[in-house]
Image (spheres, rainbow, N blue to C red):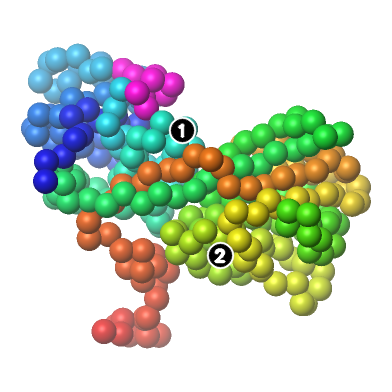
Amino acid sequence: MKHSFTTVAIVARRHTEAILASINAVEAFMQQRGVKVLFGAQTLAAIPNAQPNGGPRTRVSDEAMGASAHLVIVVGGDGSLLGFGREMAASGVPVVGVNRGGLGFLAAISPEQIENKFGEILDGQFTIEEHFLLQARVLRDGEVIAEQSALNDVVISPAGVMGMMEFALWLDDEFVYDQRSDGLIVASPTGSTAYALSAGGPIMHPRLNAIVVVPMFPHTLTSRPLVVPGDQVLRLRLLNDTATEPQISCDSQVQIRFAVGDEIQISKHPNVLRLLSPSDHSFYEACRSKLDWASRLGGQPFK
């Protein structure tokens, strides 16, 4: 199967020595295979304008990347892929990650696999999985005053020092509960292995059409994570004044302030991230390796 990736864009949010080494390795391999390479503006500013062979490197803006590249390669950790994933979702261009961060649930290729795995990808050996985004809106007197997307999660909490919040939750027009906790995590299946997992939420397969609601330190022992249908709209209202101004955090990267009486609506975003992986990539293998599943205490993993 012939690949259709004749032009790729390489992007990174951080530019450490290790990340730059991987950027150079990806560029060299793509040029060897006759693929045109573009660079995000921030990334090109961090590396020489000239290629190792002396030719000029080509810059592309984030706004034009979706129309200019057939594949976007993100070098860095999952946080970098979250940021670029939100930006690229509207274009439909597939995104693949080279992991230079921590766990690397989303970034499927390790630095030592660059030539092998990108060779397979260019030979047509890859899969593309659609990951839906969440959309958070703040309404005041029926008018939308702020909105933002998230790939992992939307977190409602006090800004600064944590403190108890009291809020009401509806699914569409059906009342669910009044909740007292230090906040609430609303996560997509993609985000179920991130902050929501640390707070005691379930692991969800990325292909599930579901959303998980995880209270943060709830003030009752019977308040548990709740998995709801992905096509419903979550509606929340803060019922009490908090010591600090409440906020919504999208993927821990974008913050929106809101006030008592505002309505927060969280639903599936119309855009999806098309996440590309080598054909042998497995979600369960990622869980085994990243979360240390099936390991014996002090011994070797079960076979």
Q: Is residue 159 visible?
A: no
Q: Could you tell me the amino acid type at mark 2?
A: Leu
User: Are the residues flagged by discs 2 and 1 in contact, CB closer than 8 Å?
Assistant: no
Magenta segment's dominant SS is helix
Q: Nearer the viewer, residue 251 or 236?
A: 236
Residue 157, position as x, y percentages in the image:
74, 50
Residue 66 colored in magenta in the image: yes
Q: Nearer the viewer, residue 34 or 79?
A: 34
Q: Which mark is residue 90?
A: 1
Q: Could you tell me the amino acid type at mark 1?
A: Ala
Q: Is residue 237 visible?
A: yes
The residue pinned by badge 2 equals 197
Q: CA distance from mark 2 to mark 1?
A: 27 Å
Instruction: Say what secondary structure mark 2 lies in.
Output: helix
Question: Residue drawn at (45%, 37%), measured in percent from left and top?
Answer: 89
Residue 210 colored in magenta in the image: no
14 vs 279, left or right, is right
User: In the displayed structure, would residue 293 be above or below residue 64?
Assistant: below
* Res 75 → quadrant: top left
- Reading the chain from its start, which is encountered first: label 2 or label 1? 1
* Res 73 → quadrant: top left
